[in-house]
Image: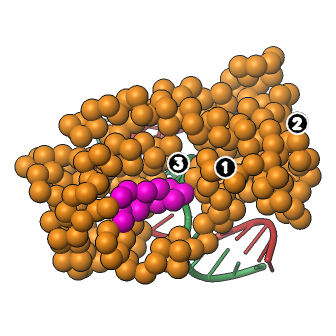
Chain colours: A orange, B red, C green
Amino acid sequence: MPELPEVDVTRQGIAPYVTGRALHGAIVRDRRLRWPVPHELGASLAGRVVRAVRRRGKYLLFDCDDGHLIVHLGMSGSLRLLPRDVPPGKHDHVDLVFADRVLRLHDPRRFGAVLWTQQPLEAHPLIRHLGVEPLSRSFNGARLHALTQGLRTSIKNVLMDARRIVGVGNIYASESLFLAGINPRTPARRLSHARCARLVVAIKHTLRTAIRAGGSSLRDFVHSDGAPGHFQLRARVYGRAGEACRRCEGTVRRIVQGQRATFYCPRCQR
DNA sequence: AAATTCTCCTGAAGGC
DNA sequence: TGCCTTCAGGAGAATT
């Protein structure tokens, strides 16, 4: 499931090929993604040069001269760069066509999105409300502390709220809270400045480690016909309910917060 | 405003 | 083997 690291590794993988190249169009085999893929996508993209590929939260942004292609991988999406003559398989819904390759979106669950906009991105409804980038300089202890002020909801839910902090998905939220030794149920407003600072360090470390792990498996991205990223990241708590904590004598617990599974060690995380 | 619930979808896993 | 049911999750939309 693509979280920030997977999206960023994808971006790194495709950027060397895509940057500076002209799109020839798009092939849409199934428009039914999270929002319908525009009928005129191919016509909108034809002839446009991709100047840069950026990431904002979990959105991939292809900057063209007078517009932006917005791609989201949803829950199960992946992008692969393939020779143009590779036949599409099941769930290969959209191809972004370049001169000698296609960028192919594979997304079984169809929670992803492919949109074209000529609006300034800072005004776009999907981008406008996004919160702070967790790997940015401005995401520090003071910023997180300010962000949690007055919030009665749990810190786990705050980490998952893209209007406040982007990109930290369910897995990395649990992992980061474990690293920081913070109980995921702690009301956000109860976190001290020191604990916020500790949590910020844990989040950055968790995300950077995952990006590094994914990046190393993607050296061959352009020629790969496998899904991107074999993240070697070994989960400390995620998915380990009932198993032994790796740090103490405790047992990892699973709870549900905001209809999402959370894993933590009650002994290590207070 | 903040918080919670609902919703989209398919594949995997578990039960019988 | 096969047919259920349940669960997983990103995040906008709807509701409380």
Tell me which amino acid carries mark 1.
Arg
A31 w.r.t. A165: above or below: below
Between circles 2 and 1, the one closer to the viewer is 1
Residue that carries the numbered disc 1 in the rendered image: A137
Residue at image location 62% in from the left, 50% down from the top: A136
Quadrant occupied by the C terminus of chain A? top right
Mark 3 Cα within 10 Å, few/some/many (few <14, many 20+)? many
The answer to the question of whether label 2 and label 3 lie on touching residues, with beta carbons closer than 8 A, is no
Chain containing mark 3: A
How many dots with numbers? 3
Identified by mark 2, the residue type is Arg
Secondary structure under tag 3 reads helix
Residue under label 3, please give it: A4
**Which of the two discs, 2 and 1, labels the residue nearer the N terminus?**
1
- The numbered mark 1 sits on a residue in which chain? A
* Stretch of the chain drawn in magenta: A52-63
Q: Earlier in the sequence, mark 3 or mark 1?
A: 3
Compared to residue A239, the image places residue A42 above or below, namely below
* Percent x, y of residue A41: 25, 74
Other-residue count near label 1 (Cα within 10 Å), few / some / many at <14 / 14–19 / ≥20: few
Residue at the disc numbered 2? A270
In the rendered image, the residue lying farthest to the top is A249
